[in-house]
């Protein structure tokens, strides 16, 4: 092997070892309450910087499987909800392409909130993906979020996890009755209120068009309520 190639590989190996062994101290912190227990990847740190503060910007993250895309939005939204704790209304809307993905991430979010003293009791998450469990949860738990429809209707969660089907049906006027009369009745009234949904998250970019269609229908007066 050429000495130049060998030297380059050795240099990279030493650099990787140092980065993995010794924490970096010059990474700027974007959070007051949330503190990741790991050294963020570059794309995560950039996402944190874009999504926090008063000048948050729309952000698209496109990286490989298992690269931590969820954390890119999860930490910023939890920080935001804590900073605005006690304020009414849904602050974050997350639309999933599959219920299984929503359920998996609901567990992760619940565990993160439960494990943080500042978040526990101050930030609530509700999951509405159609239907209802045999014993729906009325409170946040260590491993689960609120799934009881009546509870969410009476006190809107800070973060609402739902799916494309519900949003598409609501946007076209073909609603599930309780969703249309409950969440959407309140949602439609404040669709254009900047203080309502502060974060819109689409884990799969295909599904963001449903939300955009609803906003456009609302702007043009095309929405129909039951």
Image (cartoon, rainbow, N blue to C red):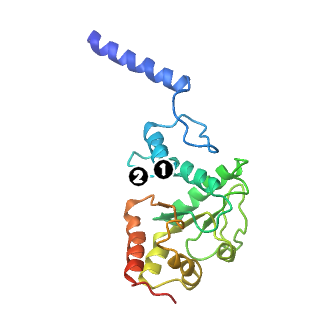
* Vertical position of residue 79 compared to residue 140: above or below: above
Label 1 packing within 10 angstroms: few (<14), some (14-19), many (20+): many
Q: Position of residue 163 (x, y in %)?
A: 50, 69
- Residue 51's tag is 1
Residue at the location (57% across, 63% down)? 91
Question: Quadrant of residue 110 in the image?
Answer: bottom right
- Number of numbered tags placed on the structure image: 2
Q: Image quadrant for the N terminus? A: top left
| Nearer to us in this view, 90 or 177 | 90
Disc 2 to disc 1, C-alpha distance: 7 Å
Label 2 element class = loop
Whether residue 164 is visible, yes or no, is yes
Which residue is outermost to the top? 3
* Vertical position of residue 3 compared to residue 112: above or below: above
Whether the residues at callouts 2 and 1 have beta carbons within 8 Å, the answer is yes
Q: Position of residue 153 (x, y in %)?
A: 65, 76
Answer left or right for 181 relative to 72.
right
Label 2 packing within 10 angstroms: few (<14), some (14-19), many (20+): some
Q: Position of residue 223 (x, y in %)?
A: 43, 84
* Vertical position of residue 205 compared to residue 89: above or below: above
Which residue is outermost to the left? 2
Residue at the location (33% across, 17% down)? 8
First-in-chain label (2 vs 1) = 1
Residue at the location (67% across, 66% down)? 146
Q: Position of residue 68 (x, y in %)?
A: 49, 45
Whether residue 1 is visible, yes or no, is no
Which residue is outermost to the front? 54
Label 1 element class = helix
* Residue marked by disc 2: 59
Answer left or right for 93 relative to 10.
right
């Amino acid at each position: 092997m050429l000495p130049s190639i060998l030297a380059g590989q050795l240099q990279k190996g030493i650099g990787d070892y140092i980065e993995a062994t010794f924490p970096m101290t010059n990474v700027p912190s974007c959070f007051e309450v949330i503190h990741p227990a790991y050294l963020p990847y570059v794309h995560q740190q950039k996402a944190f910087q874009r999504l926090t503060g008063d000048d948050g910007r729309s952000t698209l993250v496109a990286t490989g499987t298992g690269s931590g895309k969820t954390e890119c939005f999860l930490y910023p939204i939890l920080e935001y909800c804590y900073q605005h704790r006690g304020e009414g209304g849904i602050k974050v809307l997350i639309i999933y392409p599959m219920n299984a993905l929503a359920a998996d991430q609901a567990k992760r979010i619940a565990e993160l909130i439960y494990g943080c003293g500042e978040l526990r009791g101050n930030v609530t998450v509700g999951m509405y993906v159609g239907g209802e469990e045999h014993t729906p949860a009325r409170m946040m738990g260590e491993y689960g979020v609120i799934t009881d429809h009546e509870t969410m209707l009476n006190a809107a969660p800070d973060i609402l996890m739902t799916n494309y089907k519900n949003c598409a049906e609501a946007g076209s006027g073909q609603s599930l009755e309780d969703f249309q009369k409950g969440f959407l009745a309140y949602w439609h009234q404040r669709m254009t209120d900047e203080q309502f949904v502060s974060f819109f998250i689409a884990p799969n970019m295909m599904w963001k068009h449903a939300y955009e269609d609803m906003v456009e229908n609302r702007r043009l007066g095309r929405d129909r309520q039951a």
